[in-house]
Image (cartoon, rainbow, N blue to C red):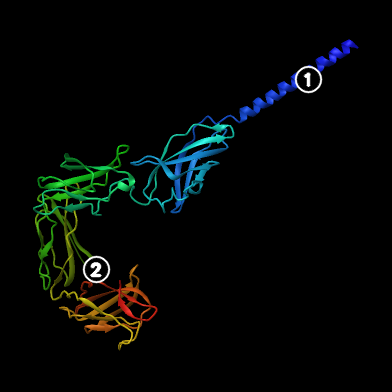
């Protein structure tokens, strides 16, 4: 009996030991499955299916049940972007996964430069952050890039103005504390300055064609260079000076004032049928067509072109009439308010103008103020005053132009903006 008891105790100890070993193995297996991810998470691309939506794709890793998101500004003040944290799963996430659901969208942040990171997470912990993915949200120029106040890509400083005068939109709100200016002449940098203001005027420079860039800077970041701007220092923009505006000969000499010395000119002439002359490589300040022009009205422009093919601004439009044609003058449109109680029916607009030279009749054009869609027009007005039919309420713009005896079209007048009031039918200037 004693042996049976001893064997029984041994059997119980063996079973307990085996149970403990099994439990330890089970625990070790669980611990192995729940080990924190060890691989970095790589973002592969960012897509913008529409202006209000963004999709960020990444490569999933083993052992991750979810992914932490971290998005920071990547500009002059690198820091966590407001609402720049969130959680993702699967192999992608949308803008809605972030605390600020509009942070990554074109609609809300066009041109913003950001960095994004991901890391795998499970119940046992978080893995390493993956490499930063640089994001430049499309839809406008980068916010950290200097934008010149002038939208033109080239300009003239003016005769007697031998310096660069630049202005741009301040980047102070984005963290820029200063700006670097670079200007070169014939490939040699001649301006290397810094300024804290959003404007710059150089010292006197020799006359020539300069290429200029500006970029914002901070102690943490140098922004991208602006687009280049060509500036013809010490010269005026050329302007058309001839032929005579009325009764020009059939083969008129087109003349203009001089621009920057050493650059060729390009002349563009068109009429109602389209482009008649597009002549480049002209070295002087005049041009005569090789064949007669048909009688009628013409418009002409001139500009200079650099040796590299970059064009400077066109001159102002110049109009002239060939043969027996006459250039209609431009009328000055005037407006009289239509108030309740006067002799004119409500909801009608009252216009007057002075007679213009060489005009047979006039055309009135009225449109919506915000998109130019026509709401009323009359093409055969012969007097110098006109009252419209009843108009729908809303804010409107009106133009007037003269038309010659042979159908020559004059230049539109400056517009007048007025309101047809819905509440009382009065027609008054706006604002």
Quarter of the figure with the C terminus: bottom left
Q: Residue at x 75, y 20 (%)?
A: 18
Q: Residue at x 32, y 73 (%)?
A: 396
Figure check: 117 above or below 344 = above
Q: Residue at x 24, y 68 (%)?
A: 273
Q: Secondary structure at mark 1?
A: helix
Query: Percent position (x, y) of residue 118?
Result: 48, 37
Query: Percent position (x, y) of residue 304?
Result: 16, 54
- As measured in the structure, the alpha-carbon distance from the residue carrying label 1 to the one carrying label 2 is 104 Å
Q: Is residue 6 visible?
A: yes
Q: Residues within 10 Å of mark 1 (few under 14, many from 20)?
A: few
In this rendering, position of residue 246 left or right of residue 121: left
Figure check: 396 above or below 192 = below
Q: Residue furthest right?
A: 1
Q: Which residue is mark 1?
A: 15
Q: Nearer the viewer, residue 245 or 223?
A: 223
Q: Which residue is mark 2?
A: 273
């Amino acid at each position: 009996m004693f042996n049976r008891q001893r064997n029984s105790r041994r059997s119980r100890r063996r079973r307990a030991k085996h149970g403990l070993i099994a439990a330890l193995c089970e625990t070790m297996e669980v611990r192995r499955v729940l080990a924190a991810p060890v691989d970095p998470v790589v973002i592969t691309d960012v897509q913008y299916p529409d202006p209000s939506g963004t999709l960020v794709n990444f490569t999933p890793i083993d052992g991750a049940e979810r992914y932490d998101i971290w998005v920071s500004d990547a500009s002059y003040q690198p820091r966590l972007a407001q609402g720049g944290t969130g959680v993702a799963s699967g192999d992608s996430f949308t803008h809605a996964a972030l605390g600020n659901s509009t942070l990554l969208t074109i609609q809300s942040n066009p041109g913003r430069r950001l960095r994004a990171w991901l890391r795998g997470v499970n119940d046992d912990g978080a893995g390493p952050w993956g490499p930063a993915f640089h994001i430049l949200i499309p839809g406008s120029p980068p916010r950290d890039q200097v934008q010149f106040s002038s939208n033109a890509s080239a300009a003239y400083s003016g005769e007697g103005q031998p310096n660069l005068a630049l202005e741009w939109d301040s980047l102070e709100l984005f963290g820029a504390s200063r700006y670097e200016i670079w200007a070169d002449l014939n490939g040699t940098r001649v301006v290397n300055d810094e300024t804290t203001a959003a404007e710059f005027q150089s010292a006197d420079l020799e006359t020539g064609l300069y290429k200029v860039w500006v970029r914002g800077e901070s102690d943490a970041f140098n922004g991208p260079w602006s687009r280049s701007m060509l500036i013809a220092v010490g010269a005026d923009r050329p302007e058309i000076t001839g032929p005579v505006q009325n009764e020009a000969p059939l083969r008129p000499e087109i003349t203009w004032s001089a621009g920057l010395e050493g650059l060729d000119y390009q002349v563009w002439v068109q009429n109602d049928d389209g482009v008649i002359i597009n002549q480049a490589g002209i070295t002087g300040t005049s041009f005569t067509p090789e064949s007669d022009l048909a009688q009628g009205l013409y418009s002409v422009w001139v500009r200079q072109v650099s040796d590299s093919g970059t064009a400077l601004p066109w001159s102002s439009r110049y109009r002239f009439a060939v043969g027996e044609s006459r250039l209609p003058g431009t009328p000055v449109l005037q407006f009289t308010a239509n108030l309740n109680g006067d002799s004119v029916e409500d909801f009608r607009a009252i216009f007057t103008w002075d007679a213009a030279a060489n005009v047979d009749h006039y055309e009135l054009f009225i449109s919506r103020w915000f998109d130019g869609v026509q709401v009323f027009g009359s093409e055969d007005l012969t007097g110098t005053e006109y009252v419209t039919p009843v108009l729908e309420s809303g804010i409107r713009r009106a133009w007037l132009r003269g038309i010659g005896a042979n159908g020559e079209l004059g230049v539109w007048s400056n517009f007048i903006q007025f309101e047809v009031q819905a509440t009382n039918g009065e027609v008054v200037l706006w604002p």
